[in-house]
Amino acid sequence: MSFDSKGYELSFVTRDNSRELSCIKFTNIYTFYSPVTKLRYIVRAEYHDEDVFAIKFYVKNHAESAHKYNLVTNLGDTRNIIITCAKVIKILLNDFPLASFAFMGSRTYQNIPHKYQEPHQNNQRFRIYSQFIQSTFGIRTFTHFQYREIGGYLLINNKNEAIQEKERSIVKMIFKNYRTEDVF
Amino acid sequence: MNINSKNINKKPLSKGERLKWTPVSKLTPIKLTMEMFDGERLSYEEMTRKNKKYENLIIN
């Protein structure tokens, strides 16, 4: 899959200061519309301790679902949707030039039957996100880390003096606050 | 709606069809362990090779 599309226009909605977890300082919420799927999407950039944003997105119609990050629409337009979500990083770096970014490939869940369709390890979303990030984010700004076991990906900002130590600090923070997979 | 009633007249799955399913143990919620966070740092050489394939980097 190539990622040379332009994506869509991203609009800032609001900053949510309510803290779902103590490690989340605030959440910037953005939105965009896909004329292909005819769906509106919500992008959340959750700012955590250790100066790291977790980027998440879901279909607005799925907002009330406990599995909103796990559902698939099968309506396509994957390239443009992912590229649009990634544009948030460029926006956030303007105000947070030292920030790092984390992504999680959630495993697929289907409402019928009510169950997950794949394990965490190397799941479909992780494989797509991994390929996308490696082809659209270079090595000048970030050092790339991937975690196949949990379907996670980390972009550590190279302005940090000790990259490896920063990576471990972020990982420990995530592990301390996200003990089960329910929150992913 | 009684979902089970739909399956009354269905033929049971063959062994081959059953084996295609992902084992249930892999589908249940997991408890995270620190070992799962042993990440793979992508090397400069590997990233340079991958970035060359695409001209439109969002951020270099």
Image: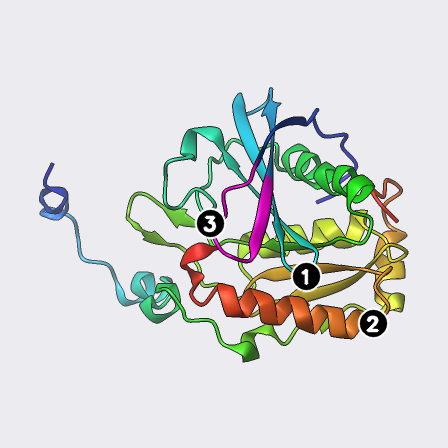
Q: Answer few, some or many: residues within 10 Å of disc 3's Cα (few below 14, many 20 plus, some between 14 and 19).
A: few
> Do the CB atoms of the residues marked 2 and 1 lie less than 8 Å apart?
no
Q: Amino acid at mark 1?
A: Glu
Residue at image point 68% right, 61% down: A50
| Horizontal arrangement in the rendering, residue A30 relative to residue A109 (left or right) | right
Region rendered in magenta = A16-27
The residue singled out by tag 1 in the image is A50
The residue wearing badge 2 is A162
In the image, taking residue A131 as reference, residue A39 lies left or right, namely left
- Which residue is denoted by mark 3 in the rendering? A20
Please state the horizontal and vertical placement of residue B14, each as a whole percent of the image.
25, 62
**Percent x, y for residue B48?**
89, 60
Label 3 residue SS: loop
Q: Residue at x 67, y 33 (%)?
A: A80
The Cα–Cα distance between marks 2 and 1, rounded to whole angstroms, is 13 Å
Apparent side of residue A124 relative to residue A115 in the rendered image (left or right): right
Q: As shown in the figure, which amino acid type bears the numbered disc 2?
A: Ala
Disc 2: which chain? A
